[in-house]
Amino acid sequence: MKNFLLTGMLALLVCIGQPEIGFAQIKTAKPRAGINTKAIVTMGASDRRSFDNDWLFSRFGLQPQGTTIPEPQGLEQVAVNDASWQKLDLPHDWAIQGPFRMDLAGETGKLPWKGIGWYRKHFNIPEADRGKRIFVDFDGAMAYARVWLNGHYLGTWPYGYSSFRMDLTPYLKFGGENVLAVNLNTEKWDSRWYPGAGIYRHVWLVKTNQVHIGHWGTYITTPEISKNAAKVKLAISVDNQGLIPVNALVSTDVYELNASNQRGAKVISAKRSVIRIGAGDSVTTNLQAFIFHPKLWDIVSPNRYVAETSVIVNGKVVDIYNTPFGVRTLQFTADKGFLLNGKRVAVQGTCNHHDLGALGAAFNISGLRRQLKILKEMGCNALRTSHNPPAPELLELADQMGFLVWDEAFDCWKHGKKKLDYNQLYDEWNEKDLKAMVHRDRNHPSVFIWSIGNEVMDQRDVEMTKYLAGVVHEEDPTRPISNGYNDPDGGRESGAVVALDVMGVNYFFSQQPKWDADPRYKNKPTIGSETASCVSSRGEYFGEKEYQNWQISSYDTAKPGWGCSPDEQFRTNAKFPNLLGEFVWTGFDYLGEPTPYGSDETNLLNFRNDPSKKAELEQKLEEMRIHNPPSRSSYFGIVDLAGFSKDRFYLYQSHWRPELPMVHILPHWNWAEKIGENIPVHVYTSGDEAELFVNDKSMGRKKKKPDVDYRLIWDSIKYEPGTVKVVAYKNGKEWATDIIKTTGQAAKLSLSVDRTVIGPDDYDLAFITVKVEDKEGLIVPRSHPLVKFIVEGPGEIVATDNGDATSLISFKSHERPAFNGLALVIVRTKKGMKGKFRVKVNSDGLEAAAVTIVAK
Ligand code: GAL
């Protein structure tokens, strides 16, 4: 290994572990002219373009209304007449438009996602591309994908959450029309939540030369980091799919990368490694670099770099590949918790499923970005991708916005929780799926823990745990491996946890001191991989009661048997300061799993290790089946399905952002039928003390006991209409104020929009909140007027919602009632159009409202 510094160079790359062969024969490529340094850097190969547009779709097997259409044979053949198939652009979720059906399981959203889908795409590849390799990359297809080109079978990838590549080259017609056919089958899949159905993530067409960097072919690590320098190691795999051996010169330049994914200054001058690659072979070369005075990635300043790797053969650049990465250190300790760049960071995370509410599973970056902004605002600093690998864009956003990510592979291993679970795939696919996750995601600085599972039935299995952890470690030894245990004692007793670097505990912390003392586990860092599971419906308050009308009171105390309130979890965290932190179940409400109104078996699974409780729950479940609740989405979210914050948002914010002056009062103050009755008032504040006033009369000043109280409660306030005001204090000084008022009747609608200017393509969305207000402009709680949505101009409605988990109105509907004063409409630009469009909302007897969106 050579290692030398050149005067005046900011940093340098040297080749390690590779013979420097054939150097003299290879001419240096000319620098490429006209590189636009402002260009947006996209990850991966340089010729990678969207393949989302202009697909044809047809559905067989189970239909939305419950009938069945037999699947014809031979739909992969070129000659199939697909003229009448539905034209669409991806990502596509074939079930999200519904209808919601009472006969379908609440657990998977009462949506008709089971079926057999065929997608076909006709496309041309120019004659000029002959000699190239042409690939299609699927970010995710639900489920059991099988792919054909021009009638030839290319392959399969059954697990709907994995990303995969298909090589089209052998059967491609250059200079002519090609037909790509994809078959998906969700009838062969079961789920504990709404999985979606279809090609629900992006698809890419990638063109390379015969010699090119492999799929996910770069792996960047930063094994030594100091203030002065970071050692950057790059393992680069180059494939030679050509017919003759080649000498390939591999070089990498590293640039700064800004938050908008634009390349900045170059920080490393490239050095080369020359490798010989036999025909049909793949060779990995290792380069090493030093970035001097590295700008570290962290959750406050998510600084990044991009490695631009070139492959040169016979003096010609044959491939360029971008790998964004970050420089940071991760330490997981049993006593000091998690250290990011040497500083303790308490993990303030949320678990989330992959659906985007009314958009369904169809991935949309505007939808995800909106969610992450809301979570950031709350003080959330970490995401758990429960219980599967996410869309790749989640990691890109997490890198850019400064989130840590617990990247999770599976909800089950060899033994399923459902009949048609991953258990069907485990033997053949576990290694392939794990490798797909790690290879795709291991350059992201945000990924800090790999998780091999969630509450898997085999969690006590020592050999299986060791084996799966081994597969991941082999592919990435730089991050710890964990597993979410709902039977943490069982996992530790059996010794399975020994194979893990971090112990993941879902809910059950009571035995923590015992395990902290056990010689096998006393040095095992532990994290709350799933906590709380508090349930609530935005804007619903039932006083003493927690459950009513299939809704749940928002005093944030209701929880299932295995869960706890946020406050109880905060107390636990304070008791065990050695824990790394927590991932709350969940940040957002999601489709499916409407616990405790699930009339299916999900709730039972949580007690599979406690037979006495199982019997009790089975009875409850039976009663639930008789009542058949309309609930079709969860109540666990801190934020509702439409993206509106529940009260809990402020409880987490008060604890997670102690420096932010804030105070929040609940409930609302519209209780005309309860004059003189007791209405408990709860206050969430980042202060330590507060005084409550009702119509200017003080109701007393209350102080939090440190590590015990996380809310202040006035539980005997006699209701009288008017104003409730709270003044919060911190260290004796006034800190923040909140006021709520009894409102008048609903008089008008008003709109607020997250962005008034959106991009030209139909992936860019604007989220418009509709508020039902009285004539003073106060939002009227408990108001549910029917709102109608109209768009004029080159825009269109994508979906509407209101956050009500019991609503069976399709998300595609252009009218729906507000739920407790709020509704949501999601709009986009019509395909291929530009200009201004107006979104209008009206409701009988209320003043209408409108907003203009500019489509650039
Ligand atoms: C956990 C499980 C989650 C979800 C949650 C609801 O046990 O891991 O997927 O079901 O319970 O509280």
Image (tube, helix red, strand yellow):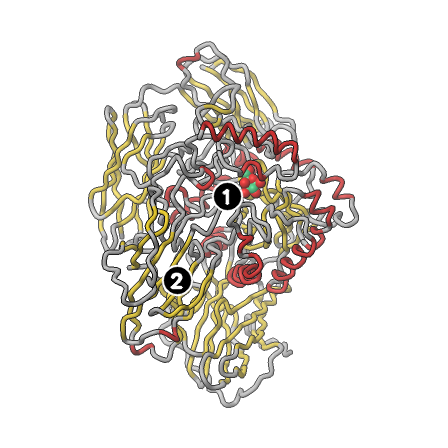
Instruction: Say if 566 sits above or below 319 in the image.
Output: above
Quadrant location of the N terminus in the rendered image? bottom right
The residue depicted at 75 percent of the width and 44 percent of the height is 516
In the orientation shown, which residue stands out farthest toward the top?
676
Is residue 440 visible in the rendered structure shown here? yes
Instruction: Say if 549 sits above or below 304 in the image.
Output: above
Q: Under tag 2, what secondary structure?
A: loop
Q: Please give the label number shown on residue 136.
A: none
The residue depicted at 56 percent of the width and 86 percent of the height is 21
Say few, some or many: other residues with alpha carbon within 10 Å of mark 2 (under 14 / 14 to 19 / 20 or more).
few
At label 1, the amino acid type is: Arg
Q: Quadrant of residue 409?
A: bottom right
Beta carbon of the mark 1 residue lies under 8 A of ligand 1: yes
**153 or 856: nearer the viewer:** 153
Q: Please give the label number shown on residue 40.
A: 2
Say few, some or many: other residues with alpha carbon within 10 Å of mark 1 (under 14 / 14 to 19 / 20 or more).
some
Instruction: Find residue 16 and report its horizontal and vertical position in percent.
Output: 61, 76
In the orientation shown, which residue stands out farthest toward the left?
793
Instruction: Say if 727 sits above or below 695 in the image.
Output: below
Dot placed on the residue nearer the N-terminal end, 1 or 2? 2
Q: Under tag 1, what secondary structure?
A: loop
Q: Is residue 474 left or right of residue 807?
A: right
Tell which quarter ligand 1 is in.
top right
Q: Which residue is mark 1?
A: 192
**447 or 168: nearer the viewer:** 168
**Alpha carbon distance from label 1 to label 2:** 38 Å
Instruction: Find residue 613 and report its horizontal and vertical position in percent.
Output: 63, 32
At label 2, the amino acid type is: Ile
